[in-house]
Image (cartoon, grey):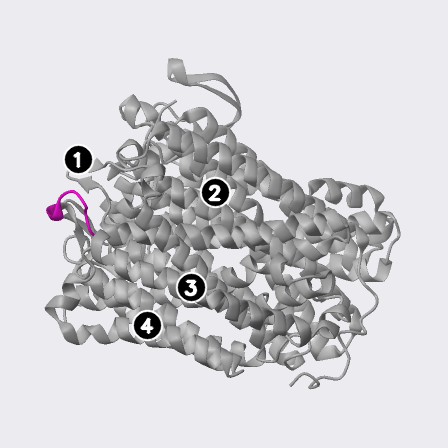
Amino acid sequence: MDVLTLSRLQFAITSMFHFIFVPLTLGLSILTAFMETRYVMTGDTTYLKMTKFWGKLFLINFALGVVTGITMEFQFGMNWAEYSRYVGDIFGAPLAIEATVAFFLESVFIGLWIFGWNKVSQKVHAASIWLVALATNLSALWILLANGWMQHPVGYVLRNGRAEMVDFMAMITNPDGLLKFAHQLTSGYTVAAFFVMGVSAWHLLRKNETDFFIRSFRIAATFGLFSTVAVGIFGDMSAVEVAKVQPTKFAAMESVWESRHGVGMNLLLLPDPPNECNSVEGVCVPNAVSLLAFHDPNALIKGLKEFPPELRPPVLPTFISFRLMAGLGSYFILAALAATILSRWGKIENQKLLLKLLLYSLPLPYLANFLGWVVAEVGRQPWIVYGVLKTSAGVSKSVSLSQVIGSLVGFTLLYGFLGVIDIYLLAKFARKGPDNDLSTLIKPRGQEA
Amino acid sequence: MELQIIWFILWGVLWAVYFMLDGFVMGAGILHNLIGKSDGDKRVMINTIGPVWEGNEVWLVTAGGVTFAAFPTTYALMFSYLYSALFLLLCALIVRGVSYEFRSKEEHPLWRKGWDSAIMAGNFLPALLFGVAFGNIFEGLPMDGAGYHGSLLSLLNPYGLLTGCLFVALFTVHGALYLTVKTTGDLSKRARTTANNLWPGLLTVAVAFLVYTNFATRLYDNYLAHPLLMIVPLSAVASLLAIRIFSAKGNPLAAFTASSVTILTVVATAIVGLFPNLIPSSMDPASSLTLYNSSSSPYTLKLMLVVVAIFIPIIIGYKIWIYRIFRAPVREEDVLGDKQAY
């Protein structure tokens, strides 16, 4: 193990951990804002109870997401100093803009939302959670534009021994960044939809607070149906973009070794990287890969053999993650469709099988998010900036092996400990159900002023 | 004015504002168990911090992000050279943040005691580490063309530790004054007494720092060359004295304002002294990271200047609005009667 490998491992662990919390924040902020808005518009206190119940889970989740995000920003400098020096001129900008434009808004208004129940009017209070939701989504935009630049660098020149920005507009209209943003956003919404459906299903199976959880479930199911379909559409568009600008990643995703026209998709497939072929191939859908990649059944797909072995990404993890993610994505659409139909026009509380299925499906969108990032980041290897800078050239020169071992062990232990506590608290408050005593919330305002 | 100089000033301002705002959070956290006697006291203190700490911490994220965007070479070398110190800092800030969120989620006294200790450690450690890190930057880091020649232990040199003590003392007094303003009754009195008792200690550390700085660093060179700049350290000294005067007169809000100005001017004193270096080298002046040799291209600097010129005033606007909404002191009955409170 060397500094490079351990730094990569540390970045993977800390970003994956951060990413347990981010997708739920993206979606649950919107759902909570929607519930509070319904309360303000209708005065129906069930919506207020929903806001409090789902909002509490949102906050427990949110806290760890925020604090582990700082690690991400610092690590670029700590472990990837050569990368930061080389690309900071263009890569630093979206990160600084994210902090200025989005993160401030989010952090300031979350304070108002948590502590301001009796300090501002209902409308201002509801507006503050909308601002939080807007800001978390804006944060994602800038972070994904930064990541999109690593996937498909645009708007720069190599000058003065580094990549310098020459076209900001090119960077913020980079299709790789924008598609990643859309795909990620809707994946986050999917996580939130399945989270709310899963928790509601747990209570509905026990006949707790049936009215409250049916209504929560219905909102989440509809939101989930739109989200899962959108994830699929943006995912398809992302794959088309990858095929165009990152041929090595695309070939690994589909495990295509030989360059050919009209490549079909084998439903059964097992890559055999040492022998540069697939050991199992079967049940082929003709021309499907070409059609998906270039929307042309006879399009040429470049195989991995077209590229020298040292420029190919690890095939197995990229291929398996992509397959699993796509499979899960299809399942989510069907599950959300069934949930929407049965909660709108049937008695969802009696659909024990579907409720159980949705309860156990709660972790699956998280898994799909992880797998998607494995495809994006492992599939980009050996590049840290595709075609421009190798990952091995980006690592810090001054950091010693013992330092990285220390921080890797430290982060893993700390994150593990906090993760267990966070999940314990989420489970505790999710099981507890809504709080029916709203006396502290709807007391007359203006006393404190 | 040259773009790099504007960015150097902005860089300094961001750190100064960060320390002013997070300084009272750290100070209140350091005092968490010392002046918070009962569970009610502690919850009141957390509720004075709760609405604002996240927004305050974002100034650090912005300072980091701006260093990355405007001075990428400084960002890369500063963060990789100070690797282990920053690792500890991150752990402390993470623990601090979740402590506020988690503490009141369980009734068990051991749970709460555990998070109380976490609040203290998670606020004390960053104050100390920031001081040590900046003390070392003032001295210059042992770096040359071949790289970095220091370690976590070499950071803990006498001047670094003294700067660490200065930060801890400054933030603790600042936090005590914040709590004096933001709480009522006995708790507020205890906070005020604490601020008054700590102030002579702060003065001692500050004098020692000013004297030692003359021997350990070259921060005074710019002041000798341009005596008019002396107004910056002189206002730092004046506001430090004003803390005591206002606090003794029973005007905690003025004393808190004075401690805010003290932090801003202490950081400004150091930044003016560093100019044009962001990080001087203690081994080879030619290896110092300056605002010229470590900055981004003019294009990026201009672009980012437009972004901050638009958004920083907006941020300041809504932050002031939020502080006004939460300007009333937190009383124990507000917290105990409200299940939503932390």
- The crowd level at tag 4 (other Cα within 10 Å; few <14, some 14-19, many 20+) is many
- Comparing labels 1 and 3, the label whose residue is closer to the camera: 3
- Comparing labels 1 and 4, the label whose residue is closer to the camera: 4
Helix, strand or loop at mark 1: loop
Label 1 in the same subunit as label 4: yes
- Comparing labels 2 and 1, the label whose residue is closer to the camera: 1
Give the quadrant of the C terminus of chain A: bottom right
Residue B145 x %, y %: 15, 39
Q: Relative to A373, is A192 above or below?
A: below
Q: Which residue is mark 1?
A: B146
Q: Which residue is mark 2?
A: A15
- Comparing labels 2 and 3, the label whose residue is closer to the camera: 3
User: Could you tell me which chain the residue with mark 4 belongs to?
Assistant: B
Residue A316 x %, y %: 46, 24
User: Could you tell me which chain the residue with mark 1 belongs to?
Assistant: B
Q: Residue at x 55, y 49 (%)?
A: B95
What separation in Å lies between label 1 and label 3 (alpha carbons)?
Answer: 39 Å
What amino acid type should be assigned to the residue bearing mark 4? Answer: Ala
Q: Which residue is mark 3?
A: B202
Q: Which residues are magenta?
A: B279-286
What separation in Å lies between label 1 and label 4 (alpha carbons)?
Answer: 38 Å
Q: Earlier in the sequence, mark 1 or mark 4?
A: 1
Residue A103: tell me if it is visible.
Answer: no
Q: Relative to A392, is B247 above or below?
A: below
Q: Residue at x 36, y 36 (%)?
A: A380
Residue extending furthest toward the top:
A275
Q: Residue at x 38, y 72 (%)?
A: B240
- Tag 1 near tag 3, CB within 8 Å: no
Q: Which residue is mark 4?
A: B236
Label 4 in the same subunit as label 2: no
- Tag 4 near tag 2, CB within 8 Å: no
Residue A285 x %, y %: 51, 30
